[in-house]
Image: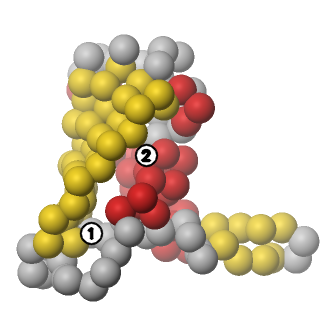
Amino acid sequence: MNISINGTGKIPSKKNQMMICGRRLVKHRDVRQFEIDLRAAAAQVMTLAGLQTTDKPVELHLDVTFGDRRRRDVQNCFGSVCDALNDTVYLDDSQIQNISASKQYKKGEWCYTIIVKIK
């Protein structure tokens, strides 16, 4: 079973986005908001497909379109995506057995597609 989640906007990188608040390390506001929005979109897709959170192994593919030609590392997008799908698509991101990604550039267009294959 495959599910596909489409989104627009930038995927914030968790790299260099953590902040110290008191004695705790917390995620930056942009990362937290992205995870909330992605979790809601994933929950909607899961509900429409009649699926519940799985405890089975999964594969994850991320297809990202960057809106400018700045040099970007696509692997930095995975942290936010994997965390956001915890307890929505899968119980824990340790269930991910294979990850893959592709990126492209299209001036002014920021979007992504996440495909999760449940084994």
Q: Quadrant of residue 25?
A: bottom right
Q: Is residue 24 left or right of residue 8?
A: right
Task: Give the residue pinned by disc 2.
Answer: 39
| Mark 2 burial class by Cα count in 10 Å: few <14, some 14-19, many 20+ | many
Residue farthest to the left? 106
Pick whichever, 40 or 111, lies toward us: 111
Residue at 47% x, 41% y is 85
| Mark 1 burial class by Cα count in 10 Å: few <14, some 14-19, many 20+ | few
Q: Quadrant of the C terminus?
A: top left
Tell me, yes or no, whether the two marked residues, 1 and 2, touch with CB atoms within 8 Å: no
CA–CA distance in space, label 1 to label 2? 15 Å
Q: Is residue 76 left or right of residue 5?
A: right
* One can see residue 15 in this view: yes
SS state under label 2? helix
84 over 70 or under it: above or below: above
Tag shown at residue 37: none
The earlier-in-sequence mark between 1 and 2 is: 1
* One can see residue 34 in this view: no
The percent coordinates of residue 87 (x first, y second) are: 55, 33
Q: Quadrant of the N terminus?
A: top left
The percent coordinates of residue 42 (x first, y second) are: 35, 40
Pick whichever, 32 or 60, lies toward us: 60
SS state under label 1? loop
Q: Amino acid at mark 2?
A: Arg
12 over 60 or under it: above or below: below
Display coloring: secondary structure
Task: Give the residue pinned by disc 1.
Answer: 9
Residue at 43% x, 46% y is 39
The percent coordinates of residue 73 (x first, y second) are: 38, 69
Residue at 64% x, 67% y is 27
